[in-house]
Amino acid sequence: MFNNLIFIILFMLGLYTLIMKKNLIKMVIGLNLMEAAVFLWVIAFSDTGGRISIHKLAETNFNFNDPVPQALTLTGIVIGASTAALLLTLIIELNKFTGTIDRDQIEGLND
Amino acid sequence: MDIKVLFLILVPLSTAFLIPLIDLINAKLRRFFVLLGILLESYLLVSIIINNFSELKKGDLFLQYHLGGWQPPLGINLVMDSLSLIFVVITALSLLLIVTYSIGYIGHHEGKYYVLYSLIAAASMGAILTADLFNIYVFIEMLTITSGALIGFKRSKEASAAAIKYLVYNILAGLLFFLAVLLIYFNLGTLNMADIALNFTTLSVQIKLFITAILLTSILIKMGIFPFIFWLPKSYDTAPSPVTAVLSGILSKVYLYIFIRIFWTVIGFKTLELLNLNSFLLNLALVSSLLGHIFALQSNNIKRLLAYSSIGHIGMIMAVIMLNSTAGFYGGILHIISHMFMKAGLFVSCGYLLQYTRSHAYRDFRGVGLKNRKVFIAFIILLLSMIGMPPLLGFASKWYVLIAFLEAQNYFGAFIVIFGSLTAVIYYLRYIAKGFEEAKLTDTELNEEIYSRPLLSVLYRGKIVSFISYTYTAIIILGGLSFRFLDLPLKISTLSVMNVEKYIELVLGG
């Protein structure tokens, strides 16, 4: 329950930042916040209270966490980092041409 | 077990990462190296078809490769059945044509361009061939990142803004897809598509609805269906012409393939019917198609107009697929093929025609046809095919789509098909007439204009570019005259979509 609450709060905070903030960098932060919310929720959900998360030891009566969501989340984090890097590069590029990172002052972002 | 299926993904992937090394030897070699990579891919595909021709004819082509030797429910596996084969073939053909075009078109930052292009090739092949849901997510994100970088490739203000907009929408869609995949994993404990398909019906209705809604939102954003169409025209407009051809010719079709795969094979059409989503989606797609054509009417920019017409056509394809009938799939897949070549051909010839103009706007289109008559005639033939003129491929596909709508007694859909053709006549005729208007600019003024523009579509090898435009036109004309030859592939791919049980059995059993 607590996990879900944190997930919803973080996700909505990210969505709010993405939609309402005029600063492009803050938009990227909002996107990353939403990603972080999803990743945190996935990791929290896959935690079954086990001590380790290695599949091989499952046979020896160890209480283990599911390793697959963690592996998938790692992939997700890598993808999130690369998209954020690409977005920030484009924002720097845009700033060179327009001299601003305000969403309202750049034509073509809000139509 | 057929390792050639794996090499279809590996060849462009390794091409992408070898290009920087080739650059160290000789920078001019990289063009031929990329071409070699795509040609090798085509060779692999041809050899797969020839080796399995007898099975292909009977309609039970099925190739599978287990990565690392893990058997299906556990490991990642690549699957090629009749549906993926037809998509791989048309994607590979488009990739080959567009890479040849790029050799003639892209004159600056070639190294970066070809790396990204090969990555798009690898990712689209991977998204079509994989049978693992998380793998689809990875390949979709690969497509998003590479195409986002290519949209911003011109490094102008508009290009960067369009790329940012494209990326924000598509990253959001990717995040939703990730969430849906993880929800499926938590509920079923598997990521294999056949295994999910086997067990998905056992879930409770609320969870089914939640997962389906998230997946649908994500894929609708990626395809550009009605509530989420607003990123599409801008990015199609500002990207370089070969990139636009990739976006509309390959990416949107790959997303349509993923849509078919997920909502017929994995989740199953019965689930959509159970949740009462099928008629909703059908009407949403039709509204999207209608809006695409209406927006195209008021558009004053040729590339944006083509983008809006893309929205119209993709909506129409999705609607005809949503009928879930054999005729619907037959028409839908035929229209996917014809739209792939028509639209890519139009963007390709646009790239040639717009080389002497200031912008893509309607007023600058004046006199374009008089300066490059041959390419303009090819352009007009492609436009006629978009409208649906009888001897061309566009007519055949629109005819089958119309028949599918009439067979299902969906008269709104049939109306949209005809409405689309009629509005297309209006908005294309405007441009054809403008193209034949006398332009007053002299040659020196033209040259000044070309060199005053920063890095905007200056052609380097015009002959290659015009040759590819003619090739697309030839494909459309020949396809229109002999579309009966497409009967067999269309029938077997329709069969393989409808027969989900066979797919599950083959994946889990073989």
Image: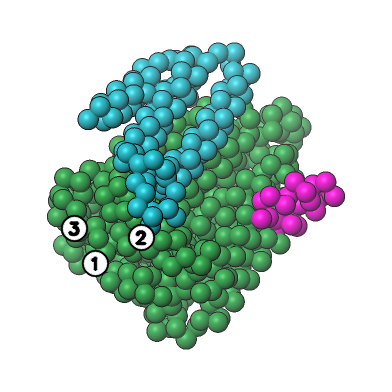
Residue at screen point 51% across, 39% down: A79
Numbered circles on residues, count: 3
| Separation (CA) of disc 2 from disc 1 | 22 Å
On screen, residue B316 above or below B239: below
Q: In the rendered structure, which disc, 3 or 1, sits on the residue that comes first in sequence?
A: 3
Q: Which residue is mark 3?
A: B202
Q: Is residue B24 magenta?
A: yes
Give the quadrant of residue B359: top right
Tell me the chief SS of the magenta region: helix
Tell me which chain appears cyan. A
Task: Please tell me which residue lies in front, B371 or B252.
Answer: B252
| Secondary element at tag 3 | helix
Judge left or right: residue B333 versus residue B97: left
Q: Which residues are magenta?
A: B14-35
Tell me which chain appears green. B
On screen, residue B106 above or below B445: below
